[in-house]
């Protein structure tokens, strides 16, 4: 398990207090290895999105520990956690979260500029070519299709060379063709760029395209299965 990028150990999450308390996660322990595309499935309210938000540093655990590249999240102050989220975690959500007044290139490079990091133009070119965006870099989001906007969001996540990309229902608002396109791109990021991707989805067909499927129910992982070539 030396290649584990994200690790959860005995993680629980409780929302509310007293009689209204809801146990969203119950003593979950799981590791996510480098270069593996993992999907997390489960019914509504099962805890799958809670798990994703916790491992992405968007929420804090009630109990247990979460680490990214060996860095324990609970040990970070607000500034350090913000920096880790910005530099080591790439986010791809159902809503593309693109700035409407910025063209595709500016949207992709925005996290780099906000963090003051040097822009590696060779890597930027490699990412945008791999995602088929070379001819769309100077288009505004309103001039792009849904699938193209999601490509921009994926490129924005990849360009920072994050430790992990987390994707929360990234195909939820897309048609069948765009869904296939986005899954192909995430797969390409794993296979061609060595990226680690963790995706929440409700769609078994989407999960079947990943390397590993975690099934969550009542706040616990009830099944952990390697699929495809990793079986």
Image (spheres, rainbow, N blue to C red):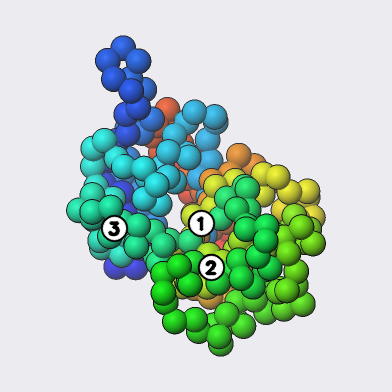
Residue 86 visible (yes or no): yes
Q: Nearer the viewer, mark 3 or mark 1?
A: 3
Residue extending furthest toward the left: 75
Dot in front, 1 or 2: 2
Q: In the displayed image of the protein, which residue is found farthest to the top?
A: 19
Distance of label 3 from label 1 (alpha carbons): 18 Å
Whichever of labels 3 and 2 marks the residue nearer the N terminus, that label is 3
Q: Secondary structure at mark 2?
A: helix
* Tag 1 residue: 91
For label 1, the SS is strand
60 on left or right of 165? left
Characterize the local packing of mark 2: few (<14), some (14-19) or many (20 or more) Cα atoms within 10 angstroms.
Answer: some
To which quarter of the image does residue 150 belong? bottom right
Q: CA distance from mark 3 to mark 2?
A: 19 Å
Number of dots carrying numbers = 3
From the viewer's side, name the closer residue of 185 and 214: 185
Q: Earlier in the sequence, mark 1 or mark 2?
A: 1
> Going 62% across and 58% down the picture, which residue do you hit?
99
Q: Is residue 150 left or right of residue 191?
A: right
- 151 is higher (above) or lower (below) than 223: below
Residue 36 visible in this rendered orientation of the protein: no
Question: Is disc 3 placed on a helix, strand or loop?
Answer: helix
State which quadrant residue 33 falls in. bottom left
Q: Which residue is mark 2?
A: 110
In which image quadrant can residue 71 be found? bottom left
Which quadrant: the N terminus? bottom left
């Amino acid at each position: 398990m030396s290649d584990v990028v994200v690790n959860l150990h005995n993680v629980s999450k409780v929302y509310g207090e007293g009689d209204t308390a809801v146990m969203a996660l119950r003593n979950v322990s799981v590791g996510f290895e480098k270069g593996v595309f993992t999907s997390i499935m489960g019914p509504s309210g099962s805890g799958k999105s809670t798990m994703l938000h916790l491992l992405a540093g968007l929420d804090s655990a009630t109990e247990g520990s979460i680490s990214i590249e060996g860095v324990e999240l609970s040990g970070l102050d607000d500034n350090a956690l913000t920096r880790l989220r910005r530099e080591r975690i790439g986010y791809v959500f159902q809503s593309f979260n693109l700035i409407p007044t910025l063209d595709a290139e500016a949207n992709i490079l925005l996290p780099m500029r906000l963090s003051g990091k040097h822009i590696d133009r060779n890597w930027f070119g490699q990412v945008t070519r791999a995602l088929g965006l070379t001819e769309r870099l100077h288009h505004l989001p309103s001039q792009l299709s849904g699938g193209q906007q999601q490509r921009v969001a994926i490129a924005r996540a990849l360009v920072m060379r994050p430790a992990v990309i987390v994707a929360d229902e990234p195909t939820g608002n897309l048609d069948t063709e765009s869904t296939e396109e986005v899954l192909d791109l995430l797969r390409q990021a794993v296979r061609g760029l060595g990226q680690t991707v963790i995706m929440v989805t409700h769609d078994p067909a989407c999960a079947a395209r990943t390397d590993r499927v975690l099934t969550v129910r009542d706040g616990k992982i009830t099944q952990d299965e390697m699929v495809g070539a990793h079986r």
